[in-house]
Amino acid sequence: MNKSEVIRVLLIEDNPGDARLIQEMLVDSAGVRFDIQCADRLSTGLKYLAEGSRESDETVPDSNSSNSAIRNPQSAFDMVLLDLSLPDSEGLDTFIQTHALAPDVPIIVLTGLQDRALGIAAVREGAQDHLVKGQVDEAILMQSIHYAIERNRLLVDLRQKSRDLELCRKSFHSIVEKNADGMLIVDLKGIVQFINSVALFQFRKKREDLLGQQLGLSIVSGEVTDVAILRADKTNGFAEMRVVDTDWEGKPACLAMLRDISDRKRAEELLIHQEKLEAMGALASTVSHEIRGPLSVIKNSSEFLKVRLGKSLDEKVSRHLKILKEEVNTADKIIDDILGFDRINELTLIQVDIGAILEATIRRVSVPDNVEIVFRLGANIPPVFIDVSQIERVFLNIINNSLEAMCDGGALTIATRADSPGEAGHGLVEISFKDTGIGIPQDNFGRIYEPLFTTKSKGTGLGLATCQNIIRAHKGEIQVESDIGKGTKVTVKLPAQGLMIED
């Protein structure tokens, strides 16, 4: 030990002879300097521990001795030599009180020969060593002090590391819990060891249902996969799950991070959808020149034959001419649908009353006798800023689809109301069409806006796709809800008065 270093000792001993003997042992120790503070009562010793300083009138070893040194009044003690039998405290409680006041200071307890069991009990409670008075010499005392200080130093370091580890653990949990991404850790057997609140929400699970259980998903380090999740707004979506190697409690494990990519996937789907529409637009000009001309010739020729044959036209020929005319009209409608893609963005906007547009649209529809049209137009509906012909086209398509879905009859309820502001912060007018038809099968529901997808024997599959693009061009929204056997509800939301449509 460096001679400039001092071991600062608090000796709590009521027997003057024993106290003097211990001081002499320490003063005479070669190569080690001790600063000794004495107390003959536990209360006095506890006071010194609490204050960490020496009373000015306390008797101390001769400061002229080369083996002693006066300690810094503001410093703490390096160790305590504690007699367990004191005038104001006796037994194990003496140690317990001292250790409670200074848990990081090593304590060596001193007992008589008959109190050996008491000393051992004190060691069990946290004392660094136990010495029997009368059986201690300088070598034993010095060894015990050095061992006690070193063991205590290791113990204090261990406690500090444990506190640091717990602080790191709490910081880790805090950071992970506040992370916007779902995070979980699984061991190499696929057992969930840790999961944050975001991931629990995404998987619609409780912590006790996942922690310590198999996740049920393939977790392979280095892989990136898409998994179905529940989004923060409680809608269904997708998360990108990235898996990397990690350690958990000293064992190899995998860390999986789940980032919501629903908006990105929707943007990708929208881009693909838009590319299809552009392809349809490119096709439209070709169809217009290459097909519509021959159809016009066929239509005119059938009309010519009908006029030329006149009264000599028999019933069979008349029926076939009628079929020819209907098929030409069907082909014309298909061409109109295709050409419609090329005209969607050419909007001529005017401010109108949406109720009047709905009533005008219904007059253009042939409503079957077994279908009832119910109007529920809300009060104080603000005007909308639309291209009338385009919006009428949307309404006609929706209404005709509803009528076709009610082949056995039913009711179509058309309602309007002023809706809350949309994503752009503008007021919306909501128009809903609810039928009591057959509904849309779940397998087809995800494809209803897909160009060229149709379940009809005669159709292009461009109806709802066209409607969606017209409504988007108006900065609006279109939503479809359906239950098999109960019907379908189509809701159109259009910006209220005065919203200018930007390119």
Image: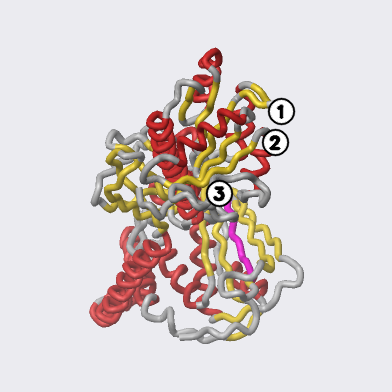
Q: Name the residue at 31% across, 77% down.
A: 281
Range drawn in magenta? 429-438
Residue indicated by mark 1: 88
Q: Position of residue 164 (x, y in %)?
A: 45, 48
What amino acid type is highlighted by mark number 3? Ala
Contact between marks 2 and 1 (CB within 8 A): the answer is yes
Contact between marks 3 and 2 (CB within 8 A): the answer is no
What amino acid type is highlighted by mark number 1? Asp
What amino acid type is highlighted by mark number 2? Ser
Residue indicated by mark 2: 43
Q: Name the residue at 44% across, 47% down.
A: 67
Q: Is residue 160 left or right of residue 419?
A: left
Mark 3 falls on what kind of element? loop
How far apart in space, not on screen, are marks 1 and 3 (Cα)? 24 Å
Q: Name the residue at 62% across, 50% down.
A: 53
Q: Position of residue 156 (x, y in %)?
A: 46, 42
Q: Residues within 10 Å of mark 2 (few under 14, many from 20)?
A: some
How far apart in space, not on screen, are marks 2 and 1 (Cα)? 7 Å
Q: Earlier in the sequence, mark 2 or mark 1?
A: 2
Q: Is 475 situated above or below 442? A: below
Residue 65 in magenta?
Answer: no
Residue indicated by mark 3: 76
